[in-house]
Amino acid sequence: MGTLVGTVVAQLPSALYRVRLDEGPVVVAHIADRVERNVVRLLVGDAVRVELSPVDGGRGRIVEKVTS
């Protein structure tokens, strides 16, 4: 599945984030290793691009922080 854009609505324990996608649903996502290595800080309200899991549509991986 492709990537979707959403907004971080909450930081959760264990380096997880709750993200509201622009299409409406809320998913739980972790940061991809590539993003983590570049020391990207995510705060509530940041726009991010998320890849959804093909197995569980409620989980995903944050692949980049979207800048305006």
Image (cartoon, rainbow, N blue to C red):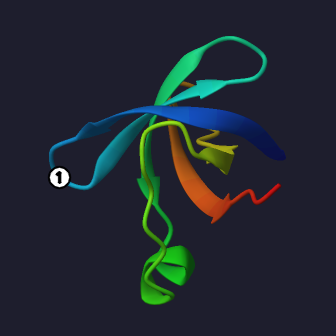
Q: Residue 45 or 51: which is nearer the viewer?
A: 45
Location of the N terminus by quadrant is: top right
Using the rendered image of the protein, determine whether residue 55 is visible from the camera's viewpoint.
no
Q: Is residue 47 left or right of residue 10?
A: right
28 versus 66 height, above or below? above
As drawn, the residue found furthest toward the left would be: 13
Secondary structure under tag 1 reads loop
Q: Residue at x 51, y 87 (%)?
A: 38
Q: Residues within 10 Å of mark 1 (few under 14, many from 20)?
A: few
Q: Between 38 and 33, which is closer to the camera in this rendering?
A: 38
Q: Residue furthest bottom?
A: 37
Classify residue 14 as left or right of residue 18.
left
> Can residue 33 be spotted in the picture?
yes
Q: Name the residue beneath numbered marker 1.
A: 14
Relative height, residue 61 to residue 56 (above, below): below
Indicate left or right for 1 with 37 as reference. right
* Residue at 55 percent of width and 82 percent of height: 34
Q: Is residue 68 above or below residue 36?
A: above
Instruction: From the top left corner, tell me how far across and down residue 57 is, in percent.
Output: 58, 26
Name which residue lies at 84% across and 46% down: 2
- What residue is shown at x 64% (from left), y 39% (from top)? 54
Q: Position of residue 13 (x, y in %)?
A: 15, 44
What amino acid is at disc 1? Answer: Ser
How many discs mark residues in the rendered view?
Answer: 1
**Residue 37 in the image, given as x and y percentages of width and height:** 45, 88
Q: Residue furthest front?
A: 68
Judge whether 60 appears above or below 66 on screen: above
Q: Quadrant of the C terminus?
A: bottom right
Left or right of residue 53: residue 11: left
